[in-house]
Amino acid sequence: MRKKTHAKNIFVHLALFAGVGITVFPFLWMILTSFKTKGEAMQIPPTIFPENFVTAAYHTVMEAMPFAQVYLNTIISTVVTVAAQVVFCTMAAYAFARIKFPGRNILFMVILSVLMVPGQIFLVPQYLIIQKAGLLDTLPALFLPNLFSAFGTFLMRQFFMSLPKELEEASVLDGCNRFQTFGKVMLPLVKPGIVALVIFTAKFAWNDFMWPLIINTSQDKMTLAPAMSFMNGQYLTNIPAQMAGAVLAVIPMVVLFFVFQRQFIEGVAHTGVKG
Amino acid sequence: MKKNIKKLAALGLTAVMCIGVLAGCGGKNKGGESSGDGDGTGSGKTRLTVGIWDEKQKPALEEMIEKYTAAHEDVEITVQTTPYKGGEYWTKLEAAATGGTAPDIFWINVLHAESYYEGGILKDLSAAASEMDIAANYPEALVSAYNFDGKQIAVPKDFDTNALWYNKEIFDKAGVAYPTDDWTYEDLTETARQLKEAGLDEGVWPFACPVDFQTWYYPTVFAAGGWILNDDKTETGYEDPKTQEGIQCWIDMIDEGLSPTAASLSETTSDTLFGSGQLAMNLAGSYMTPEYLSNDALTGKIDLVEFPEFNGVEPNVINGLGYAVYEGTKNEAAAVEFATWLGGEEAMKIQGESGTVISARNDAQHYFAESNTDINLAAYTNHAGIASPLPVCTDAAELYDLEANKIKLAYAGDMTLADACKDLKQEADALIQK
Amino acid sequence: MAGTKGLSRKKKDWIAAYIFVAPLTIGIFVFYIFPFIQNFWFSFNNVNKFNIATFAGLGNYKQLFSDKQFYRTFGNTLRYVLVTVPVGLSLSLLIAALLNTRIKGKSLYRTIYFLPSVTMAAAVAMVWKWIFNDQSGILNGLMKWLGLPTQAWLTDSGIAPYAVMVVGIWMTAGYNMIILLAGIQGISKSYYEAAAIDGAGTVKQFLKITIPMLTPTIFFVLITSIISGFQVFDTIYMMVGKINPAYESTQSVVMMFYRNAFDYGHKGYAAAISIVLFAVIMLITVIQMIGQKKWVNYD
């Protein structure tokens, strides 16, 4: 019995390890390049390890913008976006999944249709709305349209729909109204879904480039992604600086993920119980 | 326990949202003051915003602003930079203009001038232009590029031309003589052959011919006597044999093995190759100068000469930016005054001395060449007076795309240039006649 | 709350439902549906860069349906979807399954696999461009080392579309894996315990319990992958330029939309492109939604 688990584990490790190479290599390349000089980063054939480790790129990134402020803006924008989406999307998703109300299906399809057009069509109209509200070049402008997500609603709806109906019936029999059922019974059961939503939304909000660039102009109201693009020359990219920026941007996301995904470890569905 | 955690979570969420809203309110108040409306109430100063896209030119601009506001204490000017690279500068400008909040003064180029003029977002600067005697002080090509229906809609800011850069180290190693200002196209090809014969390191090329109209083939097309657009923009000249001569000369160099293939160059640009010491000679616009000079792999190894003569003519295409004033500006007088000042002697001098671009004003063009005496920057300005303007029309962007689509087939050898140009003329004429 | 006592349970439910969906719906309508409707209106007009619209009836659509370039980009995009969705889904499912087993270093592996999807698209494109570079890329270096002929990964019309797909899958496998993992977490342990008692092995458990119970999540990943596949833009835009010989065979519909809307200022035509794309995606999604009854297990 023990041998079986051992062999299986080795197989799993091998399989995963094979994938690690291709997953990690581009990323390692990014990190290594961020420590090269501008000239070396453009070398053909490319070098893997920097000849001289220089931190110039990181200095460029941090000096090109009010770095701390930009970082803070990105954090605030991301946190508010995630919090709002969790609240709004799970609420709506529950109703779409579990309450039969008139217009439910049509409303859901209408909301879903938002995903089926290129995102760029929303840029200018949203710009005009924010401008009319007098919120141009402000912090709320960064996150306002992103508080509402069709994707998030769809995701949570699927999770709610996979919960057994008996739970709700039991809760109703216990005398709970819809709100209590939602908060006390359903919500805790879709925790993995919420975690997935948090991770996905955070990733999107953190790396969003086009919208913050268009809607805000002052450097101290920018988020990380667009602030990085300012470092590029008009015609050539400052490659190490771009890589350095990308590395600095990725680290919090990785940390966030690492912390949150531990939640998954609770109640792991094992595909091999006692071996 | 679980209940408490949930309550905590709910509280946390609420707290975060409150912070968000409060930040918003605080931001809103600040936003009201510093938004691009510029009515400057509450502090008495007139606020102007200037929109640019090149971070490298920001220091020079700020120096200019300092000088100006010292002499005009009632004006406060802020600079807004939006990168050009992905077209974001224009997208943002257009969105802002649609909503009425574009910067009071902004950079404009010939690719967008006509459509912006037709869109009605550019202020007519004719009065100010005649006051500053624009016709006498600027190259005619630049002034007329920003003049539509007799209205001057921008003050020329700078221009760029093209020159031939070379890597001394590669030449020394191959034992070949450096290029000179009086070179011809034949000298260029002959030297490229010599370099190749002398044997270059792996991955190093004598020259590169990408599918690039502004720096490579338009200059030679015009030098050969060809044309791209006729005067009233109703026909294209791709089928003119002289036009094709100006393009074929570069294809020939690829065919002879003196340049990487066009496909290869579409992946690794000639600038990247030159920047990493893999190219002996490269054509480049004057705007590449700061890029080349700040590349530590090239320091001390490079110099430049004029664009080699073609068909007995010094080829060159001139393209320049302008300062435009937003039609919807709330401070017309102040904006126009500043825009005019930016075109004046003092501002042009500051710009030229920064070595980033060539100042458009006739008496300020020499500053660029003088900004760095280690290299032959004068190669860019020596013949600026006879350069041909970049051909543009309202659908310029689409036209250039059509052109690139077809011409690249000729470069790849999939079609003869004559056939490619035949198809191209049909499509291009259909486009501009719409 | 006077008068609500008389309301039937059903009606109370409806009120609750409307309260639940209100914030999201209002937000989506203001920020997304309204622009969507405006876009739809634009498709029947010629619209310039500053949103000035002149009515053009069906002109844009007529032009679109006789535009060879549109059919070409549509074909490219369809091919992109047909390859990346099945391959991506299978890979994500496989990885999620592997990452759910009892092995050491799970957290580390998960974080590593998640990395690509969190990295900025611009940096990703740049790195992969170098990897695929025909002269100096690592991939061709590897080919040479293995004695195989080098390829023009990004400039050959036949190969480039697939190179681009690799990058697309690389970027998205990570977060699809997250979603699938989350779905797996939701499956009650008791099923597995019962199966183990019945003597079912790992693979059998996976096929008979995990996959069927996971179908709602798989359905989600399928739909969202198809939708985002049809909308592919960033990676291709950044890796394949206009003078690249492989441009015609890799261009996606959204790229054509972007060019018309932002480069050329033909916003009306671009809107028509987006509406046709929308119609296709909507059709496929509706078919999927109806078909889900056949294979998706909701409790």
Image: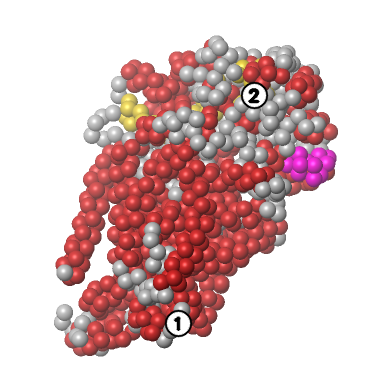
Labels 2 and 1 in the same subunit: no
The residue carrying mark 1 is: C200
Which residue is located at x 33 percent, y 31 percent?
A: B47
Q: Quadrant of the C terminus of chain C?
A: bottom left
- Horizontal and vertical percent position of residue C211: 47, 76
The span from disc 2 to disc 1 (Cα, nearest Å) is 74 Å
- Name the quadrant of the N terminus of chain C: bottom left
| Residue B242 in the figure: left or right of residue B381 | right
Q: Where is residue C249 in the image (x, y as percent from the top left)?
A: 68, 54
The spot of residue A114 in percent (x, y) is 46, 64
Stretch in magenta: B407-418
Asked if B92 appears above or below A268 in the picture, the reply is above
- Tag 2: amino acid: Asn
Q: Which residue is drawn at 51% across and 47% down?
A: A26
- Picture layout, residue B173 above or below residue B101: above
Circle 2 or circle 1, nearest the eye: 1
Name the quadrant containing residue A189.
bottom left
Residue depicted at 30% across the width and 24% down the height? B74
Identify the amino acid type marked 1.
Ala
The disc numbered 2 marks a residue on which chain? B
For residue C279, side relative to residue A260 (left or right): right
B131 and B189: which is toward the camera: B189
Q: Is residue A263 magenta?
A: no
Q: Say if residue B295 shows up in the picture.
A: yes
* B276 left or right, relative to A203: right
**What secondary structure is marked by label 1?**
loop
Residue B384, horizontal then vertical, whole percent: 64, 18
Q: Is residue B414 magenta?
A: yes
Q: Name the residue under label 2.
A: B162
